Image: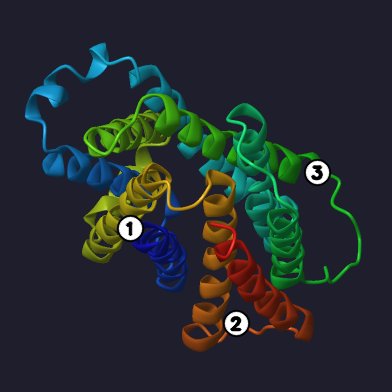
């Protein structure tokens, strides 16, 4: 259970750092690039097997890490674009509801057992997620770019499913740090390539606050994937349960931190959603 809790805390830390980027008006792209650099270096630094680092591109899991790394940063841009054209509520909902994809993938592809109480817990979790992030649009209209959240939903779901597949077929605890380091390093390289198309963005790297927050983001971002893989390897819960608890835990904790520290307002439905999420975690916990 400790790995699941560490995954939730690390992923929630990502939310906090993005809020700080917004608070101090710092460019997200630069922060993301720093974050991926730090996360990649951290993974290589703590790797227990130095020989594995030198032979990394000969490993059978390297293509998976590269694909996930590219998808990571692409999803970041989709999230940014979706926030503009579809609003944060719909973007958050699409991102978190994507948990149904790795859950279904784990049940169908790896034949994880399905019980009535697990199904009830997952349905309760999805209901809680919807209520926790739901906010009415001021104009009451559906965005013309409704396809953007759909792409986000599918993309985030594919990323989590690929992480599950890699963990199940290739990545044990011994190589999890190197695997995570490689995928973040790939994200960093893609980010640098994108920045080369906009040379003026490099000026922001002179800001010491940007460097500090980007480094902090890199540490928690690395932890969110590393701890997720360790949680999946622990076999304490079925993977479908881990993904469910992870996502609803992130939503609940992020909402509470936003309410307490960033003065974000929660509606009555949001509070009902948070309580429903907590109940769902309890229901899923007893299915282990």
Q: Residue at x 65, y 85 (%)?
A: 265
How far apart are the two marked residues, 2 and 1, measured between alpha carbons? 22 Å
Q: Is residue 61 above or below residue 231?
A: above
Element class at badge 3: loop
Mark closer to the observer (2, 3): 2
Q: Tell me if mark 3 has few (under 14), some (14-19) or many (20+) residues whose alpha carbon lies within 10 angstroms of its own.
A: few
Mark closer to the observer (1, 3): 1
> In the rendered view of the protein, which quadrant contains the N terminus?
bottom left
Mark closer to the observer (2, 1): 1
Element class at badge 2: loop
Where does residue 202 sit, x and y in percent of width and height? 31, 44
Residue 145 marker: 3
- Answer with left or right where residue 27 lies relative to residue 42: right
In the picture of the structure, the residue carrying the numbered disc 1 is: 220
Q: Name which of mark 2 and mark 3 comes first in the sequence.
A: 3
Where does residue 9 sit, x and y in percent of width and height? 40, 66
Where does residue 273 sit, x and y in percent of width and height? 72, 75
Residue 286 marker: none
* Observer able to see residue 197: no
* Quarter where residue 23 is shown: bottom left
Q: Tell me if mark 2 has few (under 14), some (14-19) or many (20+) residues whose alpha carbon lies within 10 angstroms of its own.
A: few
Q: Name which of mark 2 and mark 1 comes first in the sequence.
A: 1
* Observer able to see residue 54: yes
**Residue at the farthest top position:** 58
In the picture of the structure, the residue carrying the numbered disc 2 is: 264
- Answer with left or right where residue 110 lies relative to residue 163: right
How far apart are the two marked residues, 1 and 3, measured between alpha carbons? 32 Å
How far apart are the two marked residues, 2 and 3, measured between alpha carbons? 26 Å
Q: Residue at x 72, y 78 (%)?
A: 270
Q: Name which of mark 1 and mark 3 comes first in the sequence.
A: 3
């Amino acid at each position: 259970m400790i790995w699941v809790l560490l995954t939730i805390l690390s992923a929630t830390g990502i939310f906090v750092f993005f809020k700080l980027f917004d608070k101090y008006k710092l460019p997200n792209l630069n922060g993301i690039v720093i974050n991926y650099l730090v996360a990649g270096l951290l993974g290589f630094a703590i790797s227990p097997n130095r020989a594995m680092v030198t032979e990394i591109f000969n490993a059978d899991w390297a293509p998976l890490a590269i694909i996930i790394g590219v998808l990571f940063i692409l999803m970041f841009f989709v999230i940014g674009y979706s926030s503009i054209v579809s609003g944060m509520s719909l973007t958050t909902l699409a991102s978190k509801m994507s948990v149904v994809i790795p859950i279904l993938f784990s049940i169908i592809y790896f034949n994880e057992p399905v019980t009535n109480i697990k199904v009830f817990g997952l349905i309760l979790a999805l209901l809680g997620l919807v209520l926790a992030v739901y906010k009415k649009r001021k104009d009451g209209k559906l965005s013309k770019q409704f396809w953007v959240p759909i792409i986000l939903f599918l993309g985030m779901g594919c990323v989590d499913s690929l992480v599950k597949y890699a963990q199940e077929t290739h990545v044990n605890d011994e190589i999890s740090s190197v695997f995570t380091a490689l995928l973040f390093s790939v994200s960093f390289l893609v980010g640098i390539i994108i920045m080369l198309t906009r040379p003026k963005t490099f000026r922001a790297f002179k800001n010491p606050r940007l460097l500090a927050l980007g480094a902090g983001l890199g540490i928690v971002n690395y932890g969110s994937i590393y701890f997720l893989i360790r949680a999946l390897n622990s076999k304490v819960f079925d993977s479908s349960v881990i993904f469910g608890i992870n996502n609803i835990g992130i939503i609940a904790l992020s909402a509470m931190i936003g309410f307490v520290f960033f003065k974000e307002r929660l509606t009555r439905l949001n509070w009902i959603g948070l309580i429903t999420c907590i109940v769902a975690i309890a229901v899923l916990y007893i299915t282990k």
